Image (cartoon, rainbow, N blue to C red):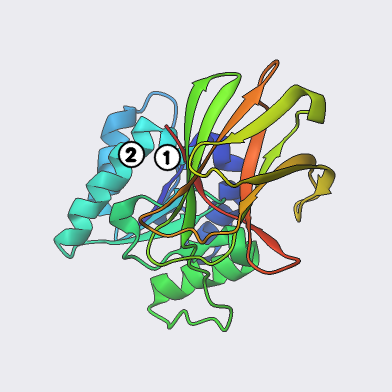
Amino acid sequence: MIFISHTAKDKAIVEPIALRLAQVYGQNNVFYDSWSIQPGDGIIDKMNEGLTNCKFFFFFVSKNSLQSNMVKLEWQNAILKASNGTAKIIPVKLDDCMMPAILLQTLYIDVFGKGLENSIRQMIDVINGTNTFSSHNQIYENVRAYITKNSSCEMIIEFRAETYMEPISRYAILVKNEENDISITCESDSIFSQGFNKNITLNNGLTCNALAAFTTRATSPEFPFKVKVTSVTKIEFIGVMRAVSENEFRMIPYLIN
């Protein structure tokens, strides 16, 4: 049995994958709530039946699914099965979320970084026991952002280097706010530079504004870079990026407390 663990908020991308797997292995061999749980069925009983019988547990990891208590219950139960050697848990990353620490030792399938078709091929390879090697290596992101929201108008963002020192400390906080509505101050450094870049177009086509924040020192595991963002009205936060070269910025995962 192939178990598809996801949240309803991600169905737009998960359902095409579930349908493809059903075409290959048969609908009865894929536990997907839309067809595996019918009106009149006990939801918990059906979920328990699917988890009991599953051999391949695909956990679709996203900002949405990490906030779902039901999904959390599913993947934590799957970890117990995996520890007993009765199932294999395979994370499938859907966005730039922060992977749960307990899953960091597990190689994941990267829909966000490699696309849908490549990921479906890898899922089929895992089920068939075929080597899933791809020449496009997964990128390990050493820098992550930890965000504390004090209110709708104020947040603290701490950029941390998790494993090793990063020589470039240049960051961008993506917002929808206009320049006269938002400001940034530094909480960790006395020497700090800032800027505001309007109408930045991201790879997904979204256009937003960027608060630039940078300092001349490195970001190290022992010395994170911390800023405070304040808005006159409400912070319309989109994401965070860091400079990886002189002319290139890359999205990084973040965790909101």
Looking at this rendering, what residue extends furthest in the right direction? 199
Q: What's the residue type where badge 1 is placed?
A: Leu
Q: Which quadrant is the C terminus positioned in?
A: top left
Q: Secondary structure at mark 2?
A: helix
Residue 164 drawn above or below residue 64: below
Outermost residue toward the top in this view? 233
Between 210 and 107, the one nearer to me in the picture: 210
Whole-percent x, y for residue 251 in the image: 62, 54
Question: Dot 2, how many residues are within 10 Å of its Cα: few (below 14), some (14-19), or many (20+)?
Answer: some
Based on the displayed image, in which of its 4 quarters is residue 198 positioned? Answer: top right
Does residue 74 appear to the left or right of 168 in the view shown? left
Please identify the residue farthest to the left as the structure is shown: 84
Above or below, 101 relative to 67 = below
Residue plotted at (50% across, 36% down): 187
- Which residue does the image show at 57% across and 23% down from the upper left? 154
Q: Is residue 10 left or right of residue 100?
A: right
Q: Residue 128's spot in the image, x, y percent? A: 41, 76
- Residue 78's label in the rendered image is none
Q: Kindly identify which residue carries mark 2.
A: 72
Which quadrant is the N terminus positioned in? bottom left
Judge the density around disc 1: few (<14), some (14-19), many (≥20) Cα neighbours within 10 Å: some
Judge whether 7 appears above or below 24 on screen: above
Q: Is residue 152 visible?
A: yes
Residue 10, quarter of picture: top right
The percent coordinates of residue 25 (x first, y second) are 46, 64
* Amino acid of disc 2: Lys
Q: CA distance from mark 1 to mark 2?
A: 7 Å
**What residue sits right under mark 1 in the picture?**
66
